[in-house]
Image (cartoon, rainbow, N blue to C red):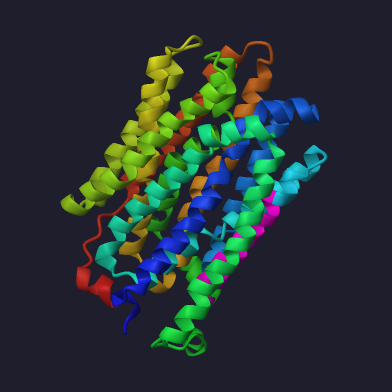
């Protein structure tokens, strides 16, 4: 039986989504303890920003190499290795005696995390038909938001009860164990049930060189358009909530840690709604670019709104704007719908990696730049955060430029299906 017609594909889908959920749940969790780490390790805001950026630097830096390797050798092994590395990084993080080990541990986490999403996309491309892809991306976005949601109030309560080290230790152990579950579902079981119609070794013999594929990718306007879309939409959101979101609630809005983590939840509620809703609207209208353009405009206006609220922002307006920013981030899966429709299946991995790198390159830059702005006003957090919001506004402008660059795909759907 063909993989794309088998009921087993839903077992694969559920398993890889669970792995993605677990990894997402710890990706932004360090943002809950930013001020606590500054106090425990006696470091500045810029150092904490550097720690967050090292994680996203590893993530962004490995996107293209992992994409090339996954296209060539298959996504399963890299998804499993990525899960193991993320678990190991979490365990090391929980035992960190100083800021240097903190930075190294988050770099390991970022390296493992770099192998997760793009391989998930390739796996879905292999197991599901093209017309199912946009709707599935909505589910992926929903699971991502739910994972991030657990890194707000639930994780904050856990940290308040057990300290910050224990939650990361337990989650790291769970991830390491779950890697064997992935091996069973993705490798052992399918090898007994299915025989791929194309042998990997024979396929690789007929492959183009890596450098030719890479040159073609980085010279494609559509690839750069998706890169910029993700840079503006994802990086600003992930970079902020993963580093300065909770401290913003504590220092500017004068909330408790638990209340500040709830503030982040409003953005995640927006993402939970945005992912499935925008995917459904897009599949109904069959116009990715038009829908995505409106999403980017909403994100730009929302970040601009946070800046124009000034040094004493209204809590209600902050909640509304965070919700809208999260809504836009939830719709960011449309980046990969563009990739899936614009490139042959054999190159989905590398282009997905290239596009995803854009989002996490900005997630690298934002914590550092934001931290440096805050250090310019060490005794006036209100003023520091006010001017810090200029950074995500500029990033959002870049994202809007990217969506304008997208060429509408006129490829016949049959050609897309034949590429599967």
Quadrant housing residue 378? top right
Nearer to the camera, 227 or 272: 272
Magenta highlight on residue 72: yes
Residue 109 as seen in the image, left or right of residue 155: right
Residue 233 x %, y %: 42, 40
Residue at point 73% right, 33% down?
Answer: 47
Q: Nearer the viewer, residue 157 or 294?
A: 157
Q: Residue furthest left?
A: 285
- Up/down of 379 relative to 286, above or below: above
Can you say which quadrant of the picture contains the N terminus?
bottom left
Q: Is the magenta region chiefly helix, strand or loop?
A: helix
**Quick check: 403 above or below 216?**
above
298 displayed left or right of 117: left
Is residue 121 positioned above or below 204 on the image? above
Where residue 74 sits: x, y (%)? 50, 75
292 is within the stretch colored magenta? no
Q: Residue at x 32, y 40 (%)?
A: 274
Residue at the front extreme? 161
Work out whether residue 69 can be spotted: no
Taking the image as drawn, is residue 349 in sight? yes
Above or below, comparing residue 59 to residue 209 in the picture? above
Residue at image position (42%, 85%) is: 193
Report the front residue among 352 and 52. Answer: 52
- Give me the residue at 43% from left, 21% from top: 306
Q: Which residues are magenta?
A: 70-90
Q: Position of residue 213 (x, y in %)?
A: 48, 71
Q: How many marks?
A: 0
Quarter of the image with the C terminus in it: bottom left
Q: Position of residue 48 (x, y in %)?
A: 69, 33
Instruction: Pick the residue in front: 301 or 238.
Output: 238
């Amino acid at each position: 039986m063909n993989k794309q017609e088998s009921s087993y594909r839903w077992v694969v889908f559920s398993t890889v989504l669970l792995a993605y959920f677990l990894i997402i749940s710890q990706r932004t969790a360090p943002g809950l303890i930013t001020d606590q780490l500054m106090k425990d390790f006696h470091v500045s805001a810029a150092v904490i920003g550097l720690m967050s950026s090292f994680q996203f630097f590893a993530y962004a830096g490995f996107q293209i190499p992992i994409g090339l390797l996954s296209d060539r050798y298959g996504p399963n092994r890299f998804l499993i290795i990525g899960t193991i590395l993320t678990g190991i990084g979490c365990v090391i993080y929980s035992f960190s005696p100083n800021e240097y080990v903190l930075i190294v541990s988050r770099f390991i986490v970022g390296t493992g995390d770099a192998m997760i999403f793009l391989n998930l996309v390739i796996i879905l491309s292999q197991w599901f038909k093209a017309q199912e892809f946009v709707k599935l991306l909505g589910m992926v976005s929903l699971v991502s938001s739910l994972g991030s949601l657990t890194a707000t109030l639930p994780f904050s309560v856990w940290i308040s009860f057990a300290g910050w080290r224990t939650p990361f230790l337990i989650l790291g152990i769970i991830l390491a164990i779950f890697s064997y579950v992935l091996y069973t579902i993705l490798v052992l079981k399918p090898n007994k049930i299915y025989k791929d119609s194309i042998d990997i070794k024979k396929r690789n013999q007929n492959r183009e060189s890596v450098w030719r594929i890479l040159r073609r990718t980085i010279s494609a306007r559509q690839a750069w358009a998706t890169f910029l879309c993700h840079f503006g939409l994802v990086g600003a959101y992930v970079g902020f909530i993963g580093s300065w979101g909770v401290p913003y609630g504590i220092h500017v809005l004068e909330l408790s840690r638990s209340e500040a983590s709830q503030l982040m939840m409003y953005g995640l509620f927006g993402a939970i709604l945005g992912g499935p809703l925008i995917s459904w609207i897009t599949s109904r209208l069959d116009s990715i670019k038009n829908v995505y353009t409106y999403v980017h405009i909403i994100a730009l206006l929302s970040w601009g709104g946070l800046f124009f609220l000034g040094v004493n922002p209204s809590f209600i307006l902050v909640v509304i704007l965070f919700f809208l920013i999260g809504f836009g981030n939830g719709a960011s899966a449309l980046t990969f719908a563009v990739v899936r429709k614009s490139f042959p299946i054999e190159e989905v991995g590398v282009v997905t990696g290239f596009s995803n790198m854009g989002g996490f390159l900005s997630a690298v830059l934002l914590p550092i730049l934001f931290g440096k702005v805050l250090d310019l006003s060490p005794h006036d957090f209100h003023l520091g955060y006010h001017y810090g919001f200029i950074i995500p506004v500029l990033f959002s402008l870049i994202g809007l430029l990217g969506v304008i660059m997208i060429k509408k795909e006129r490829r016949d759907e049959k050609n897309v299906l034949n590429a599967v």
